Image: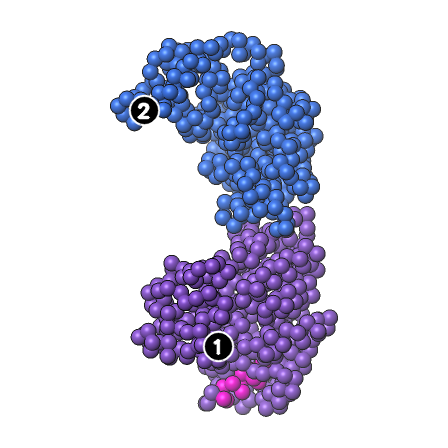
Chain colours: A blue, B purple
Amino acid sequence: MGDEDEVRARVCLTAVGPPSDPWLGTMVAEHGAGAVWSALVSGGPPPGAPPFGGELPGNLLLRWQRWSARSRKADPDRLLDASAEAGVRFVAPGDPEWPGRLDELPGGRLCYGLWVRGRGDLRNLCLRAVSVVGARAATSYGLHVASELSYDLAGRSFTIVSGGALGIDGAAHRAANTVGATVVVLACGLDVDYPSAHSALFADVAGKGVLVSEWPVGRTPRGPDFLVRNRLIAALTPGTVVVEAGRRSGALNTAAHAVELHRALMAVPGPVTSAMSVGCHRLFREGKAVCVTRADEVVEQIVPLGEAEPEEPGPLLVPAALDQGTAEVLAAVTRKGLGPATVARKCGQDLPDAMRSLGLLAAAGLVERCEAGWRLPARSPRMPPV
Amino acid sequence: MGDEDEVRARVCLTAVGPPSDPWLGTMVAEHGAGAVWSALVSGGPPPGAPPFGGELPGNLLLRWQRWSARSRKADPDRLLDASAEAGVRFVAPGDPEWPGRLDELPGGRLCYGLWVRGRGDLRNLCLRAVSVVGARAATSYGLHVASELSYDLAGRSFTIVSGGALGIDGAAHRAANTVGATVVVLACGLDVDYPSAHSALFADVAGKGVLVSEWPVGRTPRGPDFLVRNRLIAALTPGTVVVEAGRRSGALNTAAHAVELHRALMAVPGPVTSAMSVGCHRLFREGKAVCVTRADEVVEQIVPLGEAEPEEPGPLLVPAALDQGTAEVLAAVTRKGLGPATVARKCGQDLPDAMRSLGLLAAAGLVERCEAGWRLPARSPRMPPV
């Protein structure tokens, strides 16, 4: 089965199979989307042995038959056409725009593929990104802090990823979009502006950043989908900041996903008299989140090599933690930009080694993506010494 | 040298030697206050070998001579008389009112003895106590939280220990004194009301609680003394709560002492927009303090056996963590009260074992001190089952 068929199978799966389904996800991870899709369309048994040996248990059989019935109505071409009309493209694993961090989702929480709308490149946007989430019923304090934090982080070239909801999410997207780019992760089709009060915001976001969803165009949001969506917000970035969260806020669900995926979890403290900070304070007390109060402290938690200080006069400081190989790759990159293979050849390294170094350097803001491949950021004052 | 001479030597040391002096403290810990005092008064050399071998270094010799000159003017009887006139008594190690936790101060930070004023019994007050400290330049938010927290803790029979300063300290003392008792730790003589705005508060505190100081009557406060005093606030209780602290607040010094003495350190979060919460948030970020937002969470950190719930109907719940020996001691204690020797005999244990169990039970609020020795608290609904 060709790559194209695999992608078309994933397109159909977003319309037929529930995202983050443990059984379906594990099957796709083990046998490929194409094999699972063929079995569904043909009405045959699921690929591989039944999960508990022997016959397929009745409840799983029923679910398989339901997906199978739906699959016969799914048409990838029609879905892709309808999406294209709404300005929506499909991004699957292996695609240049696929964000590598999603590969760390376990099989049981797999993402079959993402629908994407907007001028930004999802992969590039996520190279240097932070998730900022919080309560819908935010206080004026929470909205103020979410805006300040997101504005400052976006000003330092971090993409702000959030869920597009009213309250903290909206404040974070809006502030980030004024100075940088932002990624909105929705729990519905990208032609369905939910909440509708954010229609204008979403249109603004699409100008520089992107909106993404696991659900095809036309799909309206349903309750449990928001929890399934939250794992993507955590998975797309190296760290999540909870700005305000009540006792049972959905933001705590995103926080739990961040912990599960071994990503940095941060929270913003607030007055103990505020019900909207109870969730954040509990994360501190349980030792799950680090206390952050401003952008600097967030950057400290998520930048593996420490942050270069482009505003400082004098030569660009290369963090002492840079190993020899990474330093050589940095020296090979030019202002104009080079492909990764050229970089690898210039410093006499294997391509995978050079790629890994480029990824680390990008996360530290020392190199950035360009059309040719990778280049030194325009604002870095001069070539760093090696 | 008799016990009385040892106490009189300690009385004099509070007037002559700086408290928490590493060299003097270590000498007192090793040779006893009496031996050190005799050497000072006689103008002889310090007891024991010079700390670095050979001759006494010039700077130490100068200090020793200064103390020696002062010691010849010190008169313990006159000092005790002047104190008694001001309603101030002296409490030294070994005294029934001496709080055992001060024995955990290392030699270099020794407390020679405490001047005490007020109707409370310092040792009993400290059996179940929490320190609540914070900035003098507190915000209305901080004052509100300090009052609420101290009121709630005092209502659960915890003594609130603090430094008597304006701001958080004052709010904590005032709230605690309305429902329970409080201990004010001053950095000056107990006849010097500093700050003078707290004269009325200190008089109120003396009615049920106590004021304590390492300095004799008449001594006015000097800058460095506050830092020396802070170690006592941390040492007198099993846990310290920082309510508000600016970047360089003195409360952070008390916090550092609590960490050094392996006591629980807690802090209250606040708005990230408040300069008075910066110190608390830094304690979280550095992993030094646990985040607490209400009295329950403070109790959780400092009560070793977990807290009985006297308000609950039905039998008093004995925490599952109670071992057999401790449970037997609890069963032996009566409502009327018994001496520890009687309790030990009743349950067939050694006196030291029974004493240790009584201490644990007192810390959990399951028994309390009385004139006869120990009794069940009046408000406990009925005898707990064993």
Residue B324 occupies quadrant:
bottom left
State the residue at coordinates (68%, 43%). A141
In this rendering, does residue A296 appear at all?
Answer: no
Quadrant where the N terminus of chain A is found in the figure: top left
Query: Disc number at residue A76?
Result: none
Among all residues in the image, which is located at the extreme left? A54
Identify the residue under disc 1. Answer: B370
Q: Amino acid at mark 1?
A: Cys
In this rendering, does residue B265 appear at all?
Answer: yes
| Chain of the residue on which disc 2 is drawn | A
Q: Position of residue B376 (x, y in %)?
A: 45, 71
Q: Amino acid at mark 2?
A: Pro
Element at label 2: loop
Q: Position of residue B245 (x, y in %)?
A: 64, 57
Q: Which of the pair B384/A161 is nearer the observer? A: B384
Q: Which of the pair B69/B308 is nearer the observer? A: B308
Q: Position of residue B366 (x, y in %)?
A: 45, 67
Q: Position of residue A100 (x, y in %)?
A: 49, 26
Q: Which of the pair B103/A125 is nearer the observer? A: B103
Q: CA distance from mark 2 to mark 1?
A: 68 Å
Residue B6 belongs to the span the image colors magenta: yes
Q: Residues within 10 Å of mark 1 (few under 14, many from 20)?
A: some
Identify the residue under disc 2. Answer: A57
Residue A174 belongs to the span the image colors magenta: no
